[in-house]
Image (spheres, rainbow, N blue to C red):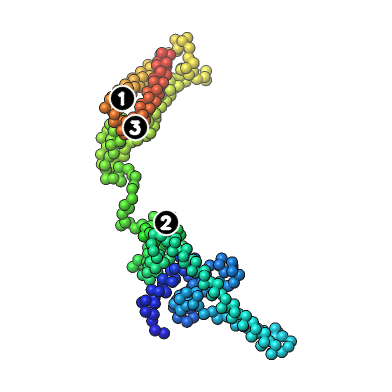
Amino acid sequence: MPAPSVSTLEATSAILGEYMLKGWTLTDLHCSSCKTTPLMREPAAIASRENRERVQFCAGCDGRPEGRVRVPPVASVPEASVPAGGLGAYETRAVASESTDRQETVAVPQQSRSRPAEASQQSQSQTEPKADPAASLSQLLLQGYSLLADTCPNTSCRGIPLAGYPKRKDGSKDGRKVCVSCGMGWVEEKSVDEGWVLTGEKKGTREDDGGAESPRSKKRRELYGLGDVKGKGKAVDVGEFERQARASENELVSKAEEKELEEAVAEVGSEGSLVHKDILTKEQSSNSIQQPHLAQSLTQTSSALSTTLSHLASSLSSLTQPERLAEGEKSGKLFVDIKLHTEALKDVLGVLGEVEKARKGW
């Protein structure tokens, strides 16, 4: 058989692409005449609605379903099923059934002739982004592209299937996808190679943008006195700074309480009872031995808390300056910073009050 011409291949591919867009199935069965073109099978819903068998055709030999030649299958009849009237009666019945099959064979193309025409009109009205996506898909199939089960997410394409790129030279799969209608392309994250560069927006840390520091991070660092962080240093956010401040505060208070409890246990001795600083009366404190170490720790804690309180007050005062207020309104962080300062001041004042009570008790 001579090789088909390029025009024939293009026409065959165009028909295959058109009917795949209409929902027909590209089977793995090849035409018995040309031995090269795969057969197309119509959707089961159309055949069941018309109460008939599903139509198959060869795009190379038949062109379209209307031009196919349907040969009715010859059924082999066992000897036990031969009628009692003899071979003549059986031949008469076989001829009658054959004529009925021929009538049905002629009727089926007439019914299916209007169906592809209606489907063609619907597909043309639905593929507005491109005049003939079936032809474009056929061209890609001829170039080695594959037809994927995924459809284009673009709403204007209305169910146009995506085409997968051909395999690479090394035989590996290429994860890129393209829509023949709108021309947009997609790629899965797992298929992204190391050499590819993502051009979309990316929100990252200072390490991702080559060490550049945003104005907001710089203002926060200057406000909280975090030091000059350059290069690939990690910027501490407001929440992290607040957690560190609370942890340092709790550590100081817990150390003072531990020392106080140790002194109380040593004082009580064999009595086996612990005396907390909040429930000590003036008489018990006067009868107890003076503890200079605990008093010294409380004094140091009170001094450290006073220093922290002074720093917070000065920072809040500088934050409420007119020029800072104007900058805060523009950047949108003024109210957040003021609230953080207020909460920190309240916490420090509360702890400082407890320390002063403990100093007076001792």
Distance from the alpha carbon under mark 2 to that under mark 1: 53 Å
Name the one closer to the observer, 155 or 280.
Answer: 155
The number of discs equals 3
Name the N-terminal-most of marks 3 and 2. 2
Q: Which residue is mark 1?
A: 320
Q: Point out the residue furthest to the right here.
A: 84
Name the N-terminal-most of marks 2 and 1. 2
Q: Disc 3, disc 2: CB below 8 Å?
A: no
Residue 347 image offset from top left, x and y in percent: 40, 24
**Which quarter shows the N terminus?**
bottom left
Check disc 2 and report its element: helix, strand or loop: loop
Q: Look at discs 2 and 1 and give the one toward the viewer.
A: 2
Q: Which residue is mark 3?
A: 333
Residue 226 image offset from top left, x and y in percent: 29, 32
Disc 3 packing (10 Å; few <14; some 14–19; many ≥20): some
Which mark, by number, is residue 208? none
Amino acid type of the residue that numbered disc 2 sits on in the rendered structure = Ser
Residue 140 image offset from top left, x and y in percent: 37, 67
Height in image: 168 above or below 229? below
Distance from the alpha carbon under mark 3 to that under mark 2: 42 Å
Q: Look at discs 3 and 2 and give the one toward the viewer.
A: 2
Residue drawn at x 49%, y 69% is: 116
Amino acid type of the residue that numbered disc 3 sits on in the rendered structure = Lys
Residue drawn at x 59%, y 79% is: 103
Height in image: 44 above or below 197? below
Disc 2 packing (10 Å; few <14; some 14–19; many ≥20): some
Q: Which residue is mark 2?
A: 156
